[in-house]
Image (cartoon, rainbow, N blue to C red):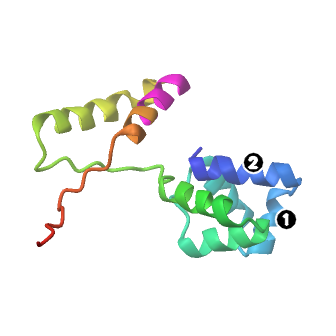
Amino acid sequence: MTPFGEKLRALRAAKGIALKTMAHEIGISPAYLSALEHGRRGKPTWYLVQRIIGYFNVIWDDAEELEKLAQVSCPKVTIDASGLGPRHVELANRLATKIAELDDFQAKHLLDVLCSLPVVDKNPTKLSS
């Protein structure tokens, strides 16, 4: 299951909406909606996310959360570590081989560590005086 799929399923459950009903009303097949919820399909298009936001009538922060979750919900990820240092390459390879062995606590811990890292601007703009 993807983060977007988990949130989508929770929204449907909270409103008591059947998967087939929702799929029909937003113009997609029930099979596709089920696959999207279970992480068997790639991240949804921006257009589909907007239809889902409208369907549930979510606004502001909740709509932004759905958009962000969609962006991090591609179940088949490729990490390109070419051109990076040896620690980066090792990290990518170890993550690829160990990810299936992580329990939820370990996965959340690693995710928390990664999300807590500051964003580093690799191309800072030089201010002229």
Quarter of image, res 124: bottom left
The image shows residue 28 at horizontal and vertical percentages of 70, 71
Q: Amino acid at mark 1?
A: Thr
Tally the marks: 2
Residue at horizontal 55%, vertical 54%? 69
Which disc number belongs to residue 121? Answer: none
Q: Secondary structure at mark 2?
A: helix
8 lies left or right of 57: left
Q: Is residue 76 something one can see in this rendering? A: yes
At a point 46% along the width and 25% down the height, the residue shown is 102
Instruction: Say which residue appears at 57% left-offset and 63% top-offset.
Output: 67
Disc 1 on helix, strand or loop? helix
Instruction: Give the residue at mark 1.
Output: 21
Q: Position of residue 68 (x, y in %)?
A: 53, 58
Q: Amino acid at mark 2?
A: Ala
Question: Where does residue 59 sit, x and y in percent of width and height?
Answer: 71, 67
Which label is found at residue 10?
Answer: 2
Q: Which residues are magenta?
A: 103-111
Prevailing secondary structure class for the magenta stretch in the rendered image: helix
